[in-house]
C-alpha cells in the first residue's frame, strides 16, 4: 500500500523498488532454517520473544529511512527478525496439540490469521496513509511486538528438543549461501534476460546447496533432516506451499498497485476493497478442516491449487476499464484456494516430522512459503515490469526529454510522477498508454501464475495419491 508513496518520495529505481519489496522475503527465506534449528536448541518461546524485539527495532529504522538504500537495509533487518517469528509460532503449536485433528484445526486458525493479516494489514496501512506519512506502516508493527513481549512469557509454554546436539554454524552459513544466490539468479534473469551472470550465480547456489545436503546427511544432529524429503507427502506439501505462495505473493503486489494506479483508488479505498478477500481465505480454511477427516489430501490439495488457478485466469481477463469488483471476486477465489492448500500442506509437513524436530519442520515449511513469496514478487514482478517497459518503449508521447521519458517507461509510478510535470493533454495521453501497458503486464503474469498452479495441482494429485484421509476426530462415531 505504501509502495507508490515510497516511489514518489524516495525515488528508487526499478531495481531498488523490487529490492525494497522482496529483500525482506529473501533474507527471511535464507535464515528460516537456521532460526528453526536454533529454536529447537535454545527454546522456541525464547527465540520468538528475541525476534519480536528485533522486528520492532527494525520497523522503526525502516519507518524513518531517508534513502532507498537505507530502506532496503532496514527491510533486510526486518527479514532477520521475521525469520525467528514464523517457525517459532508453528513449532509451538506443534507442541501444544498432540491430537492430529486438534492440531489441524489449530493450523487452520493459524493459516486464517496469516492470510487474514494479509487482508487486514493493508486496511490499517491504508488508513494510516490517509493521515500520516508512509513510514507509519512500519511504526504500527511496534505496539504489536510490544504486546507479544508482554503477554508471551505468561501465555506460552517453553518447548525445545530435549537432545538437540550442538548447533552447527557452518550449516547455517551454507543454508544462507545456498538460498540467496539461487533467488538472485532467478531475479536477475527475470530483470536482465539471458546473460552469463544468471547461470553462474545459479550454479554457485546449487553447488553450495549440494554441500549443505551432504553435510546434513553425514551429521549426527542435522539442521534439517533431509530424509524427510524422501516421503512423498512431505515433498508434495512443500511443493504445493511453494507454488501457491509464488503465484499469490507476486499477484498480490500487482493487484494493489493496479487498484491504486490504473483504477485510481486511494490506499484506504483499495484496502477496503481487499477486505472481502479474507472471506475466501476463511472459507478455504473451513473447507480444508471439515473435509480433511474423510477426504484424501490428494483431492483437497489439488482442488485448492486448481481453484486458485481459476482465480488467476479470471484476473487475466482484467482490462483498463474493468470494474474493481471483478478483480476482488477473482482474487477472492484465489484466496479460497490458498486457504485450502496452505492449511493442508502445513498440517502434512508438521505431522510427518517427529515432535522433537518441530522447529526444523516448521522452518522448512516457512522457508517454502517465504521462498515462494520472495520468488513470486521478484519473478512475476520482474515479468510485469519487463512487459510494461516493452509496451512503453514505443508508446511514450512525443515532447518528453530523455530523463522524463526514462522515468515514465521504467514504472507505472514513474509515469504518474511525470504526468504531474507535463501539460494536461500530454499527461492524459501518457497515462492512457501507461495504464494499458501496466494492465498488459498484470494479465500476462496472471496467466503465468495460473499455469504454475495447474501444474502444481497435477503433481500434488499424483504425489499424494496414496496418502489416506486423516480419519474422524477422536471420540466420534
Image (tube, grey):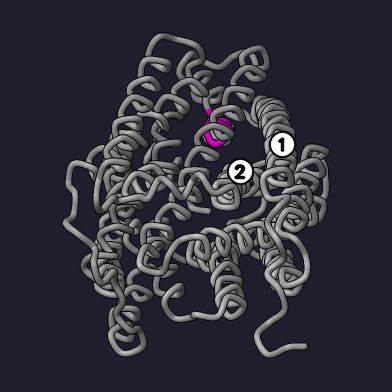
- Which residue is drawn at the image coordinates 80% and 46% (left, top)? 310
Q: CA distance from mark 1 to mark 2?
A: 9 Å
Indicate whether residue 264 is drawn in magenta. no
Vertical comparison of 356 with 371: above or below: below
Along the line of sight, the residue nearer the viewer: 413 or 446? 446
Residue 8 visible? The answer is: yes
**Whole-percent x, y for residue 289 in the image:** 69, 72
Pick whichever of labels 1 and 2 is earlier in the sequence. Answer: 2
Tag 2 residue: 243
From which residue to which does the magenta span run? 411-415
Indicate whether residue 412 is drawn in magenta. yes
Tag 1 residue: 455
Vertical comparison of 384 with 39: above or below: above
Q: Based on the displayed image, in which of its 4 quarters is residue 435 positioned?
A: top right
Vertical comparison of 334 with 410: above or below: below
Mark 1 Cα-neighbour bin, 10 Å: few <14, some 14–19, many ≥20: some
Under circle 1, the secondary element is helix
Mark 2 Cα-neighbour bin, 10 Å: few <14, some 14–19, many ≥20: many
**Whole-percent x, y for residue 273 in the image:** 70, 61
Along the line of sight, the residue nearer the viewer: 35 or 311? 35
Residue 279 visible? The answer is: no
Main SS category, magenta section:
helix
- Which residue is drawn at the image coordinates 35% and 58% (left, top)? 82
Tell whether 318 sits left or right of 98.
Answer: right
Q: Based on the displayed image, in which of its 4 quarters is residue 243 positioned?
A: top right
**Whole-percent x, y for residue 147 in the image:** 34, 81
Under circle 2, the secondary element is helix
Mark 1 and mark 2 in contact? Answer it, CB < 8 Å. Answer: yes
- Which residue is drawn at the image coordinates 30% and 58% (left, top)? 81
Tell whether 373 sits left or right of 356.
Answer: right
Amino acid at each position: 500500500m505504501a509502495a507508490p508513496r515510497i516511489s514518489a518520495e524516495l525515488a528508487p529505481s526499478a531495481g531498488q523498488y523490487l529490492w525494497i519489496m522482496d529483500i525482506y522475503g529473501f533474507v527471511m527465506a535464507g535464515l528460516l532454517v537456521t532460526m528453526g534449528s536454533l529454536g529447537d536448541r535454545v527454546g522456541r518461546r525464547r527465540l520468538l520473544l528475541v525476534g519480536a524485539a528485533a522486528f520492532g527495532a527494525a520497523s522503526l529504522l525502516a519507518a524513518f529511512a531517508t534513502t532507498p538504500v537505507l530502506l532496503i537495509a532496514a527491510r533486510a533487518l526486518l527479514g532477520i527478525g521475521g525469520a525467528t517469528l514464523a517457525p517459532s509460532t508453528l513449532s509451538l503449536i506443534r507442541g501444544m496439540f498432540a491430537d492430529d485433528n486438534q492440531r489441524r484445526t489449530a493450523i487452520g486458525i493459524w493459516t486464517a490469521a496469516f492470510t487474514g493479516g494479509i487482508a487486514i494489514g493493508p486496511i490499517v496501512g491504508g488508513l494510516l496513509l490517509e493521515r500520516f506519512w508512509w513510514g507509519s506502516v512500519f511504526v504500527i508493527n511496534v505496539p504489536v511486538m510490544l504486546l507479544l513481549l508482554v503477554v508471551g512469557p505468561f501465555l506460552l509454554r517453553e518447548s525445545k528438543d530435549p537432545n538437540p546436539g550442538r548447533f552447527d554454524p557452518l550449516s547455517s552459513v551454507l543454508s544462507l549461501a545456498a538460498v540467496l544466490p539461487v533467488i538472485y539468479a532467478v531475479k536477475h534473469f527475470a530483470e536482465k534476460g539471458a546473460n552469463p551472470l544468471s547461470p553462474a550465480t545459479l550454479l554457485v547456489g546449487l553447488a553450495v546447496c549440494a554441500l549443505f545436503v551432504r553435510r546434513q546427511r553425514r551429521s549426527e544432529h542435522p539442521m534439517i533432516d533431509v530424509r524427510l524429503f524422501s516421503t512423498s507427502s512431505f515433498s508434495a506439501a512443500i511443493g504445493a506451499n511453494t507454488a501457491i505462495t509464488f503465484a499469490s505473493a507476486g499477484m498480490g503486489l500487482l493487484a494493489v498497485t493496479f487498484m491504486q494506479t490504473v483504477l485510481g483508488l486511494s490506499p484506504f479505498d483499495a484496502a477496503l476493497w481487499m477486505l472481502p478477500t479474507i472471506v475466501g481465505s476463511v472459507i478455504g480454511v473451513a473447507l480444508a478442516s471439515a473435509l480433511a477427516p474423510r477426504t484424501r489430501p490428494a483431492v483437497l490439495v489439488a482442488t485448492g491449487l486448481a481453484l486458485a488457478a481459476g482465480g488467476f485466469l479470471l484476473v487475466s481477463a482484467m482490462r483498463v476499464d474493468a470494474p474493481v469488483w471483478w478483480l476482488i471476486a477473482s482474487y477472492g477465489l484465489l484466496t479460497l484456494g490458498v486457504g485450502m492448500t496452505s492449511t493442508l500442506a502445513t498440517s502434512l509437513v508438521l505431522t510427518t516430522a517427529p515432535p522433537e524436530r518441530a522447529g526444523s519442520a516448521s522452518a522448512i515449511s516457512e522457508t517454502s512459503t517465504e521462498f515462494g513469496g520472495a520468488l513470486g514478487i521478484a519473478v512475476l514482478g520482474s515479468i510485469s515490469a519487463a512487459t510494461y517497459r516493452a509496451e512503453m518503449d514505443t508508446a511514450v508521447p512525443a515532447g518528453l526529454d530523455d530523463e522524463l521519458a526514462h522515468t515514465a517507461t521504467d514504472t507505472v509510478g514513474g509515469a504518474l510522477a511525470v504526468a504531474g510535470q507535463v501539460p494536461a493533454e500530454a499527461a492524459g495521453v501518457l497515462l492512457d498508454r501507461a495504464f494499458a501497458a501496466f494492465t498488459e503486464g498484470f494479465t500476462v503474469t496472471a496467466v503465468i501464475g495460473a499455469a504454475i498452479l495447474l501444474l502444481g495441482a497435477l503433481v500434488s494429485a499424483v504425489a499424494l495419491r496414496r496418502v489416506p484421509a486423516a480419519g474422524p476426530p477422536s471420540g466420534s462415531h
